[in-house]
Amino acid sequence: MAKDPDLKELVEKIEDIEDDTNELNVRKVGVYKRAKAGGYDVRALKEIIADSRRSRRGDPVKIAAHETTVQRYHALLD
């Protein structure tokens, strides 16, 4: 079978991205450890970050409707 230089390049690029991702994840863990050592609730921080990302990416009307539905479900379970 003949070698495929395009495939090799793609694999190398993906490997580089994976290495970068792993490095960033190590850095992120360090920041969360620092937050925890500083007395912050890491779970709450993660929720705030998720909410922030959702609000930047999504349609505000859909986000509000979703939040209303979630609150209604919580009320039904209480």
Image (cartoon, rainbow, N blue to C red):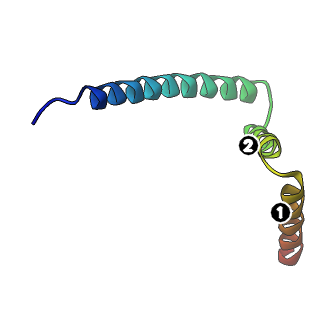
Question: Which residue lies at the image location 88% right of the left edge and 63% below the top edge?
Answer: 65
Q: Please tell me whether residue 70 is drawn above or below residue 44 in the rendered image.
A: below
Q: Please tell me whether residue 59 is drawn above or below residue 7 in the rendered image.
A: below
Residue 45 screen position, x and y as percent: 78, 37
Question: Which residue lies at the image location 61% right of the left edge and 28% below the top edge?
Answer: 29
Question: Which residue lies at the image location 86% right of the left edge and 77% below the top edge?
Answer: 76
Q: Are marks 2 and 1 in contact (CB under 8 Å)?
A: no
**Circle 1 SS class:** helix
Left-right relation of 42 to 69: left
Q: Which residue is mark 1?
A: 66
Left-right relation of 30 to 63: left
| Quadrant in which residue 44 is drawn | top right
Q: Look at label 2 and name its amino acid.
A: Arg
Q: Nearer the viewer, residue 4 or 39?
A: 4
Q: Which mark is residue 53?
A: none
Most extreme residue toward the left, as rendered?
1
Quadrant of the frame with the N terminus:
top left
Left-right relation of 21 to 59: left
Closer to the eye: label 2 or 1? 1
